[in-house]
Image (cartoon, helix red, strand yellow):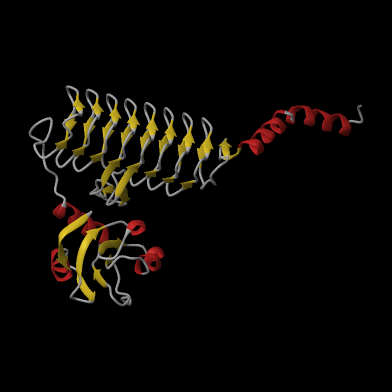
Amino acid sequence: MQLNPPVPVRWLAGFIEAELIGDPGLEATGINEIHKVTAGDISFVDSEKYYGASLGSGATIIIINRVVDCPEGKALLVCGDPFTAYVKLVKHFRPFQPADRMISASAVIGKTSIIQPGVFIGNQVQIGEHCLIHPHVTIYDHCQIGDHVIIHSGTVIGADAFYYKKRPGRVPEYDKLESCGRVLIGNHVEIGANCTVDKGVSGDTILGLGTKLDNMVHVGHGTVVGKNCLLVAQVGIAGKVHIEDEVVIWGQSGVSKDLTIGKGAIVMGNTSVTHSLEGGKIYMGFPAEEAQTKRREVVWIKRIPELWDRVQKLRDGRT
């Protein structure tokens, strides 16, 4: 999420009640997760395991839970609970705005687009030209939809990221990381019925030009789907996945978080993708392997009873 105008780091320190270490003259121009940060961004870290990655990232201002050496050109905001401080900032700069009508007055919709009855369109949404939005679609605040896009009934665009921090002994036990990202849908995309495309925690979830989603597909927060991809029914994509151009994922397959599927890869139905996949190959199985390798494995598994019987006969001296 971008901050316009920029926010002085001194104000940030006072707002979240943090100790300021480093350059007191810096200004924040955005709020972002560690894997998407650029210069000017605020990020947070609350685990020593990730200190190195955070301090060495592009983030200019880092909310952290312990005093450490501050890299040159950065500022640290030291407080007891960086997660809560980060959420406080998100709620301040992107507060929830209750709707007072089905289509927000601040939404910008192309004159040639058709919005069917029962569609909800939130604040600051942008919809291009020649789009068709079918009944009972929900488009949350700040989403952007290109030209020639079709969205079928029951689909939800821009729901919150599924991102929580476990707090043992508290009620409730899980704290929600508030989402301030968006969903960006490119031109000529078609999304089937009852799909869900979550917005990024702080960045964007993206569906590239010409990509098509079948019914009941889920795309998690911050995932980037490239151009001309096909995601077939009941495919589930976790958060922060990068799917390159021209990938096909057949039905009932699942993709774990933080992975990359290379350009032109084909993932067969009922496949579990637990590691990144190279492009230009066909994959299947649990976990996903190249299809030729997996088929040979299946053939040998089917022969286990026969081979075991032969072993038994040899052990018993039978022929």
Residue 68 sits above or below residue 317 on the image: below
The image position of residue 253, as x and y in percent, is 48, 33
Give the quadrant of residue 212.
top left
Classify the position of the N terminus by image quarter.
Answer: bottom left
* Percent position of residue 191, x then y: 33, 30
Q: Quadrant of residue 113?
A: top left
Decide which of 264, 123 is in the foreground and name it: 264
Image quarter (top left, top right, bottom left or bottom right) of the C terminus: top right
Q: Nearer the viewer, residue 255 or 162?
A: 255
Residue 63 appears left or right of 256: left
Q: Residue at x 15, y 42 (%)?
A: 124
Give coordinates of residue 43: x percent, y percent: 28, 61
Is 304 on the left or on the right of 117, as rendered? right
> Does residue 35 lie above or below 294 as drawn?
below
Q: Residue at x 24, y 69 (%)?
A: 78
* Residue 107: percent from left, percent from top: 14, 38
Q: Quadrant of residue 131?
A: top left
